[in-house]
Image: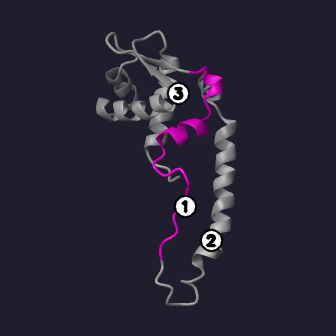
Amino acid sequence: MQIGVKFPIAVHILLSIEYFKDEKNTSEFLAETVGTNPVIIRKITSCLKSAGLVEVRAGIGGMSLAKSPENISLYDVYMAVSESKKELFKIHSSPHMCPLGGRIDALLRPHFLNAQNALKAELQYINIQNLLSELA
């Protein structure tokens, strides 16, 4: 569950799709709003589509939300674009040659899991509509 740049870009895409819903939301248009290349938008949009968060209209082009904004949590978005869906924190592998090396995983894992659960709870609480309302 490592956080990368895909997550905020995915949120930006969803916000733009709804905010500019009267526009033709193509990858080129969205790339301009995000400030990136349309290829990146298409890759992230593909993940969002697979997760059932956006609909893409072929031919005439354009995207729309597949669910109402209040039914898309930030956790849904995160899970759609996350490369590793299990752990937010990676603990380095250790040769276990010292008293600490053999115990670092057991020492850190519960604390990291608590932090991950807190983040998950917060992301589940916030939805796209909440963010749109904050923009107003």
State left or right for residue 51 relative to residue 129: left
Classify mark 2: residues with Cα within 10 Å, few (<14), some (14-19) or many (20+). Answer: few
Q: Are marks 1 and 2 in contact (CB under 8 Å)?
A: yes
Q: In the image as oriented, which residue stretches furthest toward the bottom?
A: 98
Point out residue 62 in the picture as x, y percentages from the top left corner: 39, 15
Where does label 1 land, which residue? 89
Residue that appears at 52% across and 20% down: 65
Disc on the earlier residue, 3 or 1: 3
Q: Which mark is residue 53?
A: 3
- Quadrant where the C terminus lies? top right
Residue that appears at 51% across and 85% down: 96
Where does label 2 land, which residue? 108
Amino acid on which the number 2 mark rests in the picture: Leu
Disc on the earlier residue, 1 or 2: 1
Point out residue 51 in the picture as x, y percentages from the top left corner: 51, 32
State left or right for residue 67 relative to residue 36: right
Please tell me whether mark 2 or mark 3 is closer to you in this view: 3
Membership of 69 in magenta stretch: yes
Q: Quick check: can you spot residue 133? A: no
Point out residue 97 in the picture as x, y percentages from the top left corner: 49, 90
Amino acid on which the number 3 mark rests in the picture: Leu
Q: Are marks 3 and 1 in contact (CB under 8 Å)?
A: no
Amino acid on which the number 1 mark rests in the picture: Phe
Quadrant position of residue 45:
top left
Disc on the earlier residue, 2 or 3: 3
Residue 135 vertical position relative to residue 90 in the rendered view, above or below: above
Classify mark 3: residues with Cα within 10 Å, few (<14), some (14-19) or many (20+). Answer: many
User: Gap in Å between the C-alphas at discs 1 and 2?
Assistant: 10 Å
- Segment tinted magenta in the rendering: 67-93
Q: Which mark is residue 13?
A: none
Point out residue 120 in the picture as x, y percentages from the top left corner: 65, 47
Q: Secondary structure at mark 3?
A: loop
